[in-house]
Image (cartoon, helix red, strand yellow):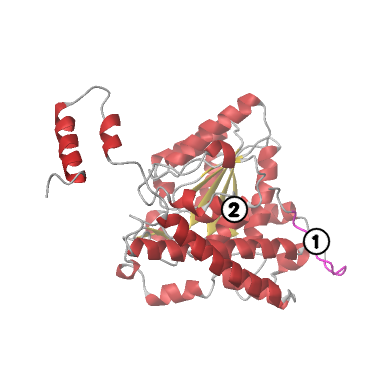
Amino acid sequence: MSAHPLTLAADPTVSTADLGSLLAARQDDPASTAPFQLVDENGDLTAAGQDLGVDLELAQVLHTDMVLARRLDHEALALQRQGELHLWIMAWGQEAAQVGSIRALRGDDHVFPSYREHAVLLCRGISPADLLRQWRGATHSGWDPAESHVHINSLVLGTQTLHATGYAAGVRLDRSDEVVMTYFGDGAASQGDVNEALNWAAAGTLPVVFFCQNNQWAISTPTATQMRTPLHVRAAGFGLAGYHVDGNDALAVHAVTQHATARVRAGEGPALIEAQTYRLAGHSSSDDPKRYRTDDELAGWQAKDPITRLERLLRNAGVSERHFSDLEARADTFAVEVREQAKAIHGEDLAVVFEHTYAEPHPVMQSELAQHLARRDGAVA
């Protein structure tokens, strides 16, 4: 998988403004608080989008990625409600931030996710079965990081940023030009681990990009309550390059990530990207967002849906209807595959847990194992 380039507009009357210059100008302008956009909520090109142009082929790839990722999300939540998965962490609304960023990386760039980056995993070729194995309770992880260059999910909030920083130190020692990417949410940004990782990465000029999906809610705590200064502004205090992008604009996310990654790969130090997005569903299948969010707030963000936005751009650009009909059929087929693969996942017998809990035999564990085996074999009603 290679990164797609951002192409310039074909209209010769449009200026070919350099993305780096645009971003630098925004960083130098204290009044520039709005996140960087190429495509607005209506699917129209912004001034920056008109200057830089957009790659319609890339846009179709990202649109496909997002549609399939959301279909996985819908099917997985249904499976959880049916008792087929123990838990599910939804990412509805955050698809653009994920696919735009991961598609800007090289295939050998290593990724450290949290627990919500399902679209990232799909883009790296991880199958639904391997993605869902953990949530079905069959194993601690379902894929080999050495093959996908994606580390296993981290359920401890923010710890993956330290893992990424340590890995990036190894990349530096190997004198490789690999870039490390780690994802985290606005809630994790308040964790000590994340702040330590930012400091160590900057102090060591390590090749790592910190990608924050600011979905406005740390479970039930709003971002405005959690932090008084935007995260991308705080980056400068640690010594990182900071970027602020519309996380519902897949093309803008791709462009900013591509730019930031190129700087990091060139040895200019780590970067932090804050993508402003929104979690349209609950924090997890165990959460009820209606208890802390208003209908008006949700409706406002639904109008900014990243999939709808990119579809409007593609339709306005004259992309063939076949793209949309073929994608709909592909998503239906994919949904069937998700259900079939999920139900085919079977873990080892629970008895193996007792074999690995203590290094030496333990009388209480032996008693519990005997009770489990009796129940399993039908000796106990």
- Circle nearer the N terminus (2, 1): 1
Task: Please tell me whether the stretch drawn in magenta is mainly helix, strand or loop.
Answer: loop
Residue at the (60%, 67%) spot, across then down: 330
Badge 1: few (under 14), some or many (20 or more) residues near its Cα, within 10 Å? some
Which residue appears farthest toward the right when viewing the image? 12
Residue 13 location in percent, x, y? 86, 70
Residue 65 location in percent, x, y? 60, 61
Viewer-nearest residue: 314 or 47: 314
Residue 99 location in percent, x, y? 59, 56
Q: Tell me if residue 215 can be seen.
A: no
Gap between marks 2 and 1 measured at Cα = 25 Å
Viewer-nearest residue: 135 or 105: 135
Residue at the (84%, 67%) spot, across then down: 10
Query: What amino acid is at disc 1?
Result: Leu
Query: What amino acid is at disc 2?
Result: Cys
Residue at the (50%, 64%) spot, across then down: 336
Residue 175 occupies which quadrant of the picture? top right
Q: Secondary structure at mark 2?
A: helix
Q: Tell me if residue 191 can be seen.
A: yes
User: How many marks overall?
Assistant: 2
Which residue appears farthest toward the top when viewing the image? 360
Which residue appears farthest toward the left when viewing the image? 381
Residue at the (59%, 72%) spot, across then down: 328
Residue 37 is labelled as none
- Is 363 placed above or below 351 here? above
Q: Is residue 90 magenta?
A: no
Viewer-nearest residue: 129 or 164: 129
Viewer-nearest residue: 122 or 212: 122
Give the residue number, with chain letter if any, for mark 1.
8
Residue 123 is labelled as 2
Look at the image and give the residue range highlighted in magenta. Answer: 5-14
